[in-house]
Image (tube, helix red, strand yellow):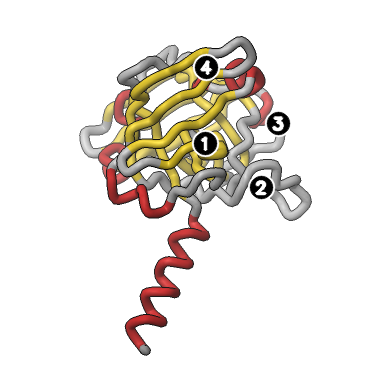
Amino acid sequence: MFTGIVEELGTVAGIEDQGDALRLTIHAQHVLADAGLGDSISVNGCCLTVAERDGDTWTADVMQETLDKTSLAGVQPGDRVNLERAVTPTTRLGGHIVQGHVDAVGVVRRRTPSEHWEVVEIEMPAHLGRYLVDKGSITVDGVSLTVVEAGADSFTVSLIPETLARTTLGSRKVGDRVNLEVDVLAKHVEKLLAHREGSA
């Protein structure tokens, strides 16, 4: 589990294509301070497991399911990626509860810069719309954000200078693909209500 507060921008150091999977090697420093084999690290919002560690790089196995449903299929050596270690019982929950299980891939539709922030509109699959509300939470490439406006097939977020400087969202261009994870609490509420209505 994660909080959606990015700790570090890592760099893709290598990719080994295995046909139905790939081995992804990432250069990092901060998130490796206490990372060991088997630990979870969020990469652009995808929960990956440390399979190897060598100095300031670590390697994860990315299965076909993850490649099919996230933007990790398109990463290249040299790309920057958002990194966050899994939470501990004493971690401050600065964002919201994030599982690292991507629901869908969205597309940056529009960027509107202002003097002190930037509004970004992201297109999403319409079936995710029911989980978004104005001022609710969403995870974009592993970053916990507040929804400004929730539409039928898109939503907007307002990015502060800190987010623009410390995450990949500062450099995402119109047309770029981003990983989306909706608030898991909304999905649980939906299921509980459906069960209650079905048993009434």
**SS category of the residue bearing label 3:** loop
Report the mark closest to the observer, 2 or 3.
2
Q: Earlier in the sequence, mark 3 or mark 1?
A: 3
- Label 2 sits on what residue type? Val
Q: Which residue is mark 2?
A: 87
**SS category of the residue bearing label 2:** loop
The image shows residue 190, relative to residue 59, as above or below, that is: below
Report the mark closest to the observer, 4 or 1.
1
* 181, 83: nearer the viewer: 181
- Label 1 sits on what residue type? Val
Q: Which residue is mark 1?
A: 148
Label 3 with label 1: CB-CB less than 8 Å: no
Left or right of 60 in this view: 66 = left
- Label 3 sits on what residue type? Ala
Report the mark closest to the observer, 3 or 1.
1
Total labels drawn: 4
Q: CA distance from mark 4 to mark 2?
A: 24 Å
**SS category of the residue bearing label 1:** strand
Q: CA distance from mark 3 to mark 4?
A: 25 Å
What crowding class fits label 4: few (fewer than 14 Cα within 10 Å), some (14-19), or many (20 or more)?
Answer: some
What crowding class fits label 2: few (fewer than 14 Cα within 10 Å), some (14-19), or many (20 or more)?
Answer: some
The image shows residue 65, relative to residue 106, as above or below, that is: below
Q: Is residue 29 visible?
A: yes
Q: Which residue is mark 3?
A: 33
